[in-house]
Image (cartoon, rainbow, N blue to C red):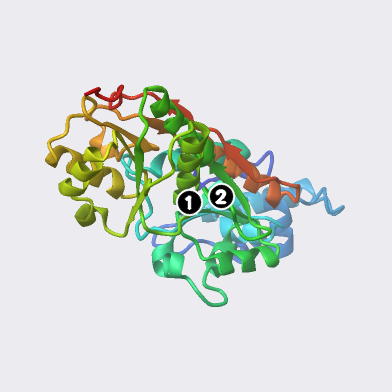
Amino acid sequence: MRINHGEGRGVVNEATGRAKSGRKPAPAGRRSRPRQAEVAQLAGVSQATVSLVLSGRDEATGRPISEVTRRKVLHAAQTLGYVPDPAARRLAAARNNLLGVFSFTATFPTDVRHSYYPFLVGVEQEAAAQGYDLVLFTGSSAGGADAVGAGALNRVRLADGCLFLGRHAPSDELSRLVRDGFPVVHLGRREAPEGIAWVGADYVSASRDVVTALAALGHRRIVLVREDDDALASADRERGFLDGLRSAGLPAGPDPVYRSADPSSDLTPERVRAWYADGVTAFVAEETDTGAAWRSLRRAVTEAGLSCPGEVSLAVLGSPPPDLAEEPMPMGFDIPRSELGAEAVRLLSALVAGEPAEPKLVACALRPGRTTGPPRTV
């Protein structure tokens, strides 16, 4: 599949009047792409005739071109090394056969270790299956999540529709695109503004399942560590965590959720030891782009001198950061990122085609891991 580099170069097939690979080199000394007007001049015909021959549209328009004229045009195109301009061809059509992918991160996440990378794999594979090329955008040039003002995201209109990724997104600008009739899908967003289609992971059910599994091991005091922001993914995880406590008949207090704007400095070994002394035997951290909550929890437990899973059990609502993959895999759940990416493309493709498309939640699979066990009895 081609990604924002345009279509492959080719010459004209004499039998069909369409482009094929292996074009003849342009005349020596030439620097610019030959134009249809030059083909028309060399063939001694009008530019309109050249356009009809090279596009193969003469029969469809009811203006069949004679075989003699067709051969003149094709010979002139080959002589000049004429290549159809993909941008011009697409602008002449109702659609561009391009789907946009907009990331609200400063650098588009293409590193295989980045948590967004599997999403992009699914997006690319499904786009190819649907016959679309991709145009990649990054939020850094428009302020990312802070993009404000009319037209802040207008450049995505180069595509037929756009898929947006990221924990935070400018709702007003996305809503503006939808009101203008531009197809928009948010990957990962659930309680989106009215009219914005989305595909997301079912973090609520998955987080509830983690708590249920810990309760089945015998844990009665569990604390969730999360970052202090308003991301919907974080809110969903907290909701599932609290639902799990209630479903298991466990106390929802005191203070079962620890929120911090900077867990790396706020979550200290002393705080963890105090929780343990008060009867907390299991800790759960949310997954985020940075993995800050999970990293801080691991460090604080280790520095507190507590063994895992001997004295305390640890779980993450999602997966640990890729750079920690060599460590024992913690209990949690696996987000079907590639499936989510593919589902988002299918939804966007339906919207581009003018078909109805319903938001969709995709289930996450519970991962037992190696960081949990029954609480130690005294």
Q: Nearer the viewer, mark 2 or mark 1?
A: 1
Alpha carbons under labels 2 and 1: distance apart: 61 Å
Q: Nearer the viewer, residue 76 or 271?
A: 271
| Residue 85 in view, yes or no | no
| Residue 344 in view, yes or no | yes
Q: Give left or right: position of 181 versus 76.
A: right
Q: Mark 2 sits on what residue?
A: 78
Q: Nearer the viewer, residue 378 or 147?
A: 378
Q: Nearer the viewer, residue 39 or 250?
A: 250
> Disc 1 on helix, strand or loop?
helix
Q: Quadrant of residue 216?
A: top left
Q: Position of residue 291 (x, y in %)?
A: 30, 46
- Residue 293 drawn above or below residue 247: below
Q: Give left or right: position of 207 versus 289.
A: right
Q: Give the amino acid type for the residue marked by disc 2 in the picture.
A: Gln
**Residue at the farthest bottom position:** 149
Q: Nearer the viewer, residue 376 or 104?
A: 376
Q: Give the amino acid type for the residue marked by disc 1 in the picture.
A: Ala
How many marks the image carries: the answer is 2
Q: Position of residue 202 (x, y in %)?
A: 54, 39
Mark positioned earlier in the residue sequence (2 or 1): 2
> Disc 2 on helix, strand or loop?
helix
- Residue 64 drawn above or below residue 316: below
